Image: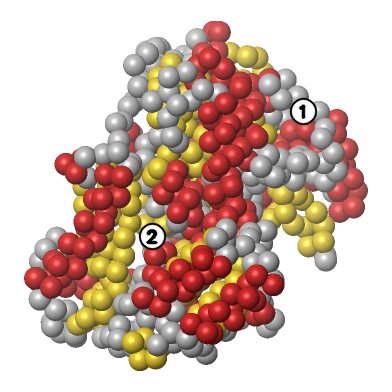
Amino acid sequence: MKCLGIDVGGTFTDFILIDSDSGFVKVEKVSSTPHDQSLGIDTGLSLLGESIKRIDVLVHGTTVATNAILTRSGARTALITTAGFTDVLEIGRQNRTNLYSLYPKRITPLIPREYRYGVKERITSKGEILEGLSVENVAEIIEHLKKNKINSLAISLFFSFFNPSHELIIEDLVRKSIPDISISRSSWVLPVFREYARTSATVLDAFVAPLMRNYFNSLLVKINKRNIKISPLILLSTGGVTQIKNAAEKSVETVLSGLAGGVLGGLYSSNELGIKNALTLDIGGTSTDVASVLEGNIEVTTENTVAGYPLPLPTIAVQTIGAGGGSIARYEHGVFRVGPESAGAEPGPACYNQGGKEPTVTDANLVLGMLNPKFFCGGSVEIFPKLASEVIQSLAEELDFPSIYDCASGIIEIFENNISLALRKVSTERGYDSRNFSLIAFGGAGPLHGCSLADRLSMKHVIIPPYPGVWSAYGLLTADIRHDLTKSILKPMDIITKQELEQEFSELTNMGVNQCMDDGFKEKDVMITRSLDVRLIGQSYELSVPYYGDLKATSHAFDKAHEKAYGYSSPDARREIVNIRVAALVPLPKFHLRSLPSGKKSPPEESHQGRREIFLQGQWCEVEIFLKSMLEGNNIIDGPAIIEQNDSTTLISPHWQGEVILDGHILLQKLI
């Protein structure tokens, strides 16, 4: 089976091609093209050449939706909601991300007030029509949509998750008058309780849907041009994949697509090495993504946000910060800062010689000797140490550093401190002892900073995957087909019967199975998992627990989850089922990478590339340089040392030791 994973990041687009029958692996990295990500993909496909013929599986992770929201460059969008609720986006939940800020900043809604329309209608909390839909009112709104050249519309009416009839009528009327407009209905996007969350998800879908459809069309053109006959699978925010047509129909499910691949890659590494608890660290050119693997599983949450906007759909629980190889270092308002601004792919760090004029983390690592200018991206990308030295020299003079090396070290210190704070958010701040976790470091820069970051969190083990620079792309190939469905029922647990609950689940299960069958699979291939969102009556928020057909067991599981989350449980208190959830999964074929030759403890002579001076921990030291492609299983390398490969560079710090595992992973262990 021949599989191709394509992961688009802010700076690089990564490709990994694997033939599981022959063990053939080919890796490529090209600069991303933010204005049209499909152009970078086309470049990478051309580099892969004849090897892409007769591909069986193509999986793609994209950041198109993410970037559109972050930069507010989505479609010209309007909202139709029940009269009196047009400001729900403005009011929000009244949450403060920084409780003690003297000058809190509110998130500006994606849709300005002049494009938010209230329509006369009302449906009760039981789904009954209290006030019929005013068709005349809708006609007036349609004229406004035409006048303001709106090309995407979000419809989110009060209690439409119980009765979508009015939303369906509005959609039909608008389509008849404006055939080309994109429409997102809340009763389709997220038919659940909570007005603000549901409206927010629907608006996000409407905001990115036209861009995603245009992008997918462009992607298909590029793929067909290369004679790839299969339809690509798109990675969803849940870590599952779906056919491209499904991703286009509900684009909001791809908002965290670009982040999920790395977490899946980290999960694969932890499972392969038998590590139950790990933190995944994906340091790219623009951002760093971190997540936790607990007891061999990754967490899926419905409480994620993107650019401050709630994303109440099931998504992998991943934290992302503006810290990457392209993060810009500057002195501003009396503070030495690194990021979140990034040089990105265009113009990139100063050392790329593409117009970058500000010092970045990559420039700092080059000045410190960590990167080999003759072997950057395996020698396919030329970088210029002189340009990096010039921009860091300028910053060093501005800040009165004794040398450019001290300035570069300061950049790395701030950069790593920012990342360590993110790692603590998914470990110690959630009550987990980071000392009991292993750090799985990948991305272009992850292996270079893995040991230092592990030291900051008192971690003893760092795992470097076989192809760390493209491990997110590899993670795509480990995903399964997945469709998530949710329905609000809002019924006390002691009143609803098992038969009623099974009937509710049956409807969602049939929908999930049908969607998998539409993807080309058979009913017998589909696996169903079920869960309930439960809360104590009177509580504002609920907890998700598995449902295996026994309400008493579910109630007990809820008590345990409640005690873990809040420190107490109330077994005698009444509880309420808020939502039911179904995940329809089709496991895709899995494969393993070809094993390395088994060697001795001492690395082979041909793997040794000489010695190089690097500026480490405030002083110059000479380190051994090894080539990863020449290493063998069982090789042991003592730090300080550097391992170079086409897609990344690994630094083994002093008092650390690296062992090459037969499957290609490198296990770094703290010696003292």
**Mark 2 residue element:** loop
- Quadrant of res 165: bottom left
Q: Which residue in the protein does label 2 denote?
A: 314
Neighbourhood count class around disc 1 (C-alpha, 10 Å): few under 14, some 14–19, many 20 upward: many
Whether residue 80 is visible: yes
Above or below: residue 293 compared with residue 589: below
Q: Height in image: 430 above or below 612?
A: below
Provide residue 311's location: percent of width, then percent of height. 47, 65
Q: Which residue is drawn at 24% across and 61% down?
A: 508
Question: x, y (%) of residue 398?
Answer: 90, 52
Q: Mark 1 points at which residue?
A: 383
| Residue at 13% in and 73% down | 500
Real-space Cα distance between discs 1 and 2? Answer: 41 Å
Q: Is residue 82 in view?
A: no
Residue 350's image quarter?
A: top right
Q: Looking at the picture, does residue 573 appear above or below residue 474?
A: below
